[in-house]
Amino acid sequence: MRPNQILGSLGVAALIALATLGVLSLAEGADGDIPVRFEGRVLWIAGETVTVATDDDQSISVDLAHVPQDQYQRLRSNDRVVVIGSIVSEQSRVLATSIEPLAP
């Protein structure tokens, strides 16, 4: 496994662990995807991928391919955001449907 695949897998595992502890909203959908909602701060953005650090310093890779560009085009490092999407069982990241900045 490449290092970014390992980190991505650890991020998804961290999301599931956080959900188990009740930190995240989580419930499995009919199609096997697991809906998720979490808050954090932007670490970096590259193309249609953003890495978000949760409040307990877990790094989560988020795919923005299904998010309207106007929702993320102005985001910068350290911006606080809320991400809504799903954990897709075949991927090692969250597939976002929405990412919104939080008021400072």
Image (cartoon, rainbow, N blue to C red):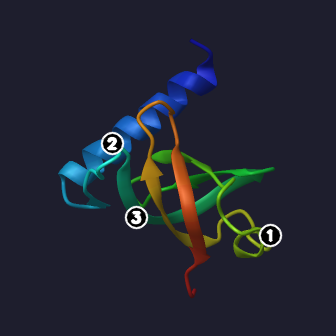
Rounded to the nearest angstrom, the CA distance separating label 1 from label 3 is 20 Å
Q: Look at discs 3 and 2 and give the one toward the viewer.
A: 2
- Disc on the earlier residue, 1 or 2: 2
32 in relation to 55, above or below = above
Q: Which residue is mark 2?
A: 32
Contact between marks 3 and 2 (CB within 8 A): the answer is: no
**Outermost residue toward the top?**
1
27 in relation to 78, above or below = above
Question: Where residue 54 appears, x then y in whole percent?
Answer: 45, 57
Rounded to the nearest angstrom, the CA distance separating label 3 from label 2 is 16 Å
Label 2 is placed on what type of residue?
Answer: Gly
Relative to 62, is 47 on the left or the right? Answer: right
Relative to 50, is 34 on the left or the right? Answer: left
* Dot label at residue 37: 3
Mark 1 crowd level (few <14, some 14–19, many ≥20, 10 Å Cα): few
Question: For residue 4, which quarter of the picture?
Answer: top right
Rounded to the nearest angstrom, the CA distance separating label 1 from label 2 is 30 Å
Contact between marks 1 and 2 (CB within 8 A): the answer is: no
Mark 2 crowd level (few <14, some 14–19, many ≥20, 10 Å Cα): few
Question: Where residue 51 appears, x then y in whole percent?
Answer: 62, 50
- Disc on the earlier residue, 3 or 2: 2
Q: Which residue is mark 1?
A: 73
Mark 3 crowd level (few <14, some 14–19, many ≥20, 10 Å Cα): some
Label 3 is placed on what type of residue?
Answer: Arg
What quarter of the picture does the N terminus occupy? top right
Nearest the camera: 22 or 28? 28
